[in-house]
Amino acid sequence: MKVLLIGSGGREHALAWKLAQSPLMTEFYAAPGNPGIAEHAVLVPVDVEDHEAVAAFCKDKAIDFVVVGPEAPLVAGLADRLRADGLVVFGPSAAAAQLEGSKGFTKDICARYGIPTGAYQRFNNAPKAKAYIRAQGAPIVVKADGLAAGKGVTVAMTLDEALDAVDDCFEGAFGAAGAEVVVEAYLDGEEASFFCLCDGKHALPLATAQDHKRVGEGDTGVNTGGMGAYSPAPVMTAEMVERTMKEIIEPTMRGMAESGHPFSGVFFAGLMITAKGPELIEYNVRFGDPECQVMMMRLKSDLLPLLLATANGTLDQVDAEWNDDPALTVVMASKGYPAAYEKNTPILSLPEAGEGEKVFHAGTALKDGALVATGGRVLNVTATGGTVAEAKDRAYALLDKVSWENGFCRRDIGWRAIERETGSDKV
């Protein structure tokens, strides 16, 4: 098969690494890719925002299958444009991608189909949003409605924090994404990420993971796109997975089909496991980043047939097999992230990864033949182990061999799972 992968981040490097292992693959391209992805695919300098250019490339190379990694091209309708040419595409239509593109859309689907989630209201102006917040009190959650690269969410523990978050949205901190605001109830519990392939009629549960969103150790500081993750998430027991499928995934799949927007792609359900059970925080319509990195390390099955079955509507004919060993990834980010950071800082060397280890490139480029950091989140240093504690030790041992002066990381990734393993509160 001739395959084109869209994207350039750590998630796409993990997908490329796994897809390249498929015996079905004959030619593999990535647009625009990154230096890590270049180990597995031919990089093509196509602007993925230019849907006509992507379509022309697919025609020129007789591409059989397109895998869209990031959310922005999906929300912008790239999958629709390519399907119009008869291409097989992994990723939802623009209409179905509203599940991530509009938090209000998702909340409305939840309300309509009885999907457990926090109570909410939608607002298109600051005074009404603030009046509602004052009436509800804190803690409370304020979200920019649109795509804000994982940064448009404020879990406000005080009224002032919540009111400031409303101002940020309506004063343009998140661009067009903040033109509408969703204010919702604070859910108390433990967060988990749940992934499930869906072809519009059938759903295949994949793996669970737990992400560390806050920039600081002990889950302190501002939210980021994710500073590290591990899989599986111990809080997602077999019973919790079954309940998530029955109470959240299946009604969403049914609701999207009934709404005229059948969903084909991957459901990434951000969950809060509360005293009541699983409740939906939000949907994403692509693999998580950095959750994808740990999932791909654990996936035994060939990824390509799974994604192809999703795109072709034959998901009931395939299954996914997983390694029991946990995987853990630590994000190395540019100093200053998620606020302003210096770009093009040199990464002098990366370590040789052993069995069950991998350094995924998330925000790197080659400048004059030298590797530089171009993004906020730059490397995902990943390892497996017999326990989460062992995976963590291996990942940090590998990370400590990275020679990059401008990088920083959290040193406590996996702390919740390690507490469970050891019965101790020591990381």
Image (cartoon, rainbow, N blue to C red):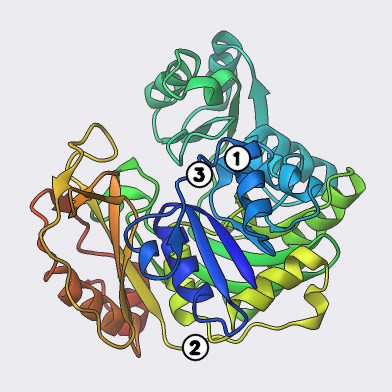
Mark 1 nearby-residue class (10 Å; few <14, some 14–19, many ≥20) = few
- Going by the numbered disc 2, the residue's amino acid type is Asn
Residue shown at the point (20%, 56%) measured from the top left = 409
Q: Which residue is mark 2?
A: 323
Compute the Cα span from label 2 to label 1: 39 Å
Q: Is residue 319 left or right of residue 357?
A: right
* Residue that extends furthest to the top in the rendered view of this protein: 127
Above/below status of 219 relative to 352: above
Above/below status of 315 relative to 61: below
Compute the Cα span from label 3 to label 2: 36 Å
Q: Which residue is mark 3?
A: 46
Q: Nearer the viewer, residue 59 or 423?
A: 59
* Residue that extends furthest to the front in the rendered view of this protein: 60
Q: Is residue 245 in view from this perspective?
A: yes
Q: Comparing marks 3 and 2, which lies closer to the viewer?
A: 3
Would you say the residues marked 1 and 3 are in contact, meaning their CB atoms lie under 8 Å apart? yes
Q: Secondary structure at mark 2?
A: loop
- Going by the numbered disc 3, the residue's amino acid type is Val
Which badge, 3 or 2, comes first in the chain's sequence? 3
Spot occupied by residue 339 in the image (x, y as percentages of width and height): 26, 33
Q: Nearer the viewer, residue 332 or 29?
A: 29
Q: Which residue is mark 1?
A: 53
Mark 2 nearby-residue class (10 Å; few <14, some 14–19, many ≥20) = few
Q: Secondary structure at mark 3?
A: loop
Q: Secondary structure at mark 1?
A: helix
Q: Is residue 118 in view from this perspective?
A: no
Spot occupied by residue 125 in the image (x, y as percentages of width and height): 59, 11
Q: Which mark is residue 192?
A: none
Spot occupied by residue 378 in the image (x, y as percentages of width and height): 28, 53
